[in-house]
Image (cartoon, rainbow, N blue to C red):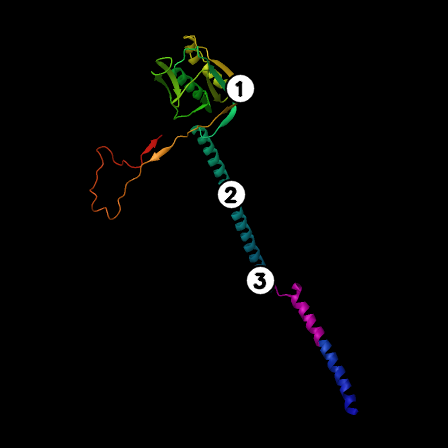
């Protein structure tokens, strides 16, 4: 009984001592974490460390911003490049006549009684190109740099010997209708300049009718120009020994890969 009474005071003392130690530890922790209790050199080191981290983060932000800007500019450049290629391809299709075209322009109508020859048609077409024509057709035949306007003869026709004009090797029938897409006023002025093609035709009593049209449609070529390329003949390894060497004809350095328009 006396032993139990002795343990109670000891337990109380130990409990109080533990509480005091805990309170002292918490106070020291708060003091250590409070910057007001830190030493000056420690605070300076902390400030320097935070400043360096801030500079590194700022540099990373600048670098990432530059990368983002570069990617955006590259994307815009690629988009512009693709748009430019698309426009160039569309221009080439129009020039080569592989695509139909719609737009304002003029129509030139030539009746059968007008004394027109194929060179007159050539002159009209050239004047239209010079006046800014975008596309031209004669009786629905698309005119390009590969088109032919010529004259042919038929000695076996029912009416006897006859001569007729052709476009792209097809016979032209009257009325001859030339459709041209472009700025109508410029096209008309190009044809009606004093001393121009219309004045020359008037000397032979030929007066083609010129009509401005708000919307014309010119068809694409029925048979676009095809190119064939010759390639070098290379004998197999087994036939190399038996094949005699060949030489190029005089004046021809490389007769291979020659483009043949058709």
Please state the horizontal and vertical placement of residue 54, each as a whole percent of the image. 57, 55
Pinpoint residue 175: horizontal percent, then vertical percent: 46, 15
Tell whether position 149 is magenta: no
Please tell me whether mark 1 or mark 3 is closer to you in this view.
1
Q: CA distance from mark 2 to mark 3?
A: 45 Å
Element under label 1? strand
Residue 225: image quadrant is top left
Q: Residues within 10 Å of mark 1 (few under 14, many from 20)?
A: some
Q: Position of residue 233 (x, y in %)?
A: 28, 41
Quarter of the rendering occupied by the C terminus: top left
Q: Which residues are magenta?
A: 21-41
Q: Is residue 98 above or below residue 158?
A: below
Q: Is residue 25 left or right of residue 239?
A: right
Instruction: For mark 3, give the secondary structure.
Output: helix
Q: Identify the residue position indicated by label 2 in the image.
A: 75
Q: Nearer the viewer, mark 2 or mark 1?
A: 1
Q: Which residue is mark 3?
A: 45
| Mark 2: few/some/many CA within 10 Å (<14, 14-19, 20+) | few
Query: Which mark identifies residue 213?
Result: 1
User: Does residue 24 show up magenta in the picture?
Assistant: yes
């Amino acid at each position: 009984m006396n032993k139990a009474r002795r343990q109670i005071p000891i337990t109380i003392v130990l409990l109080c001592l533990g509480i005091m130690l805990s309170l002292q530890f918490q106070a020291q922790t708060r003091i250590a974490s409070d910057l007001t209790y830190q030493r000056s050199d420690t605070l300076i080191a902390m400030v320097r460390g935070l400043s360096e981290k801030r500079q590194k983060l700022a540099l990373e932000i600048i670098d990432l911003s530059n990368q983002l800007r570069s990617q955006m500019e590259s994307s815009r450049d690629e988009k512009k490049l693709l748009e430019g290629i698309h426009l160039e391809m569309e221009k080439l299709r129009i020039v080569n006549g592989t695509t139909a075209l719609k737009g304002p322009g003029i129509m030139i109508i030539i009746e059968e009684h007008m004394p027109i020859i194929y060179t007159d048609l050539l002159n009209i077409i050239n004047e239209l190109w010079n006046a800014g024509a975008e596309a031209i057709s004669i009786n629905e035949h698309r005119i390009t740099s590969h088109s032919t306007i010529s004259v042919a003869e038929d000695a076996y026709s029912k009416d006897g010997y006859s001569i007729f004009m052709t476009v792209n090797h097809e016979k032209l029938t009257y009325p001859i209708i030339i459709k041209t897409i472009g700025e109508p006023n410029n096209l008309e002025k190009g044809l009606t300049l004093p001393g121009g093609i219309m004045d020359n035709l008037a000397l032979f009593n030929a007066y083609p009718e010129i009509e401005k049209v708000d919307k014309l449609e010119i068809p694409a070529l029925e048979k676009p120009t095809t190119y064939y390329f010759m390639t070098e003949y290379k004998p197999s390894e087994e036939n190399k020994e038996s094949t005699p060497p060949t030489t190029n004809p005089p004046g021809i350095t490389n007769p291979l890969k020659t483009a043949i328009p058709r």
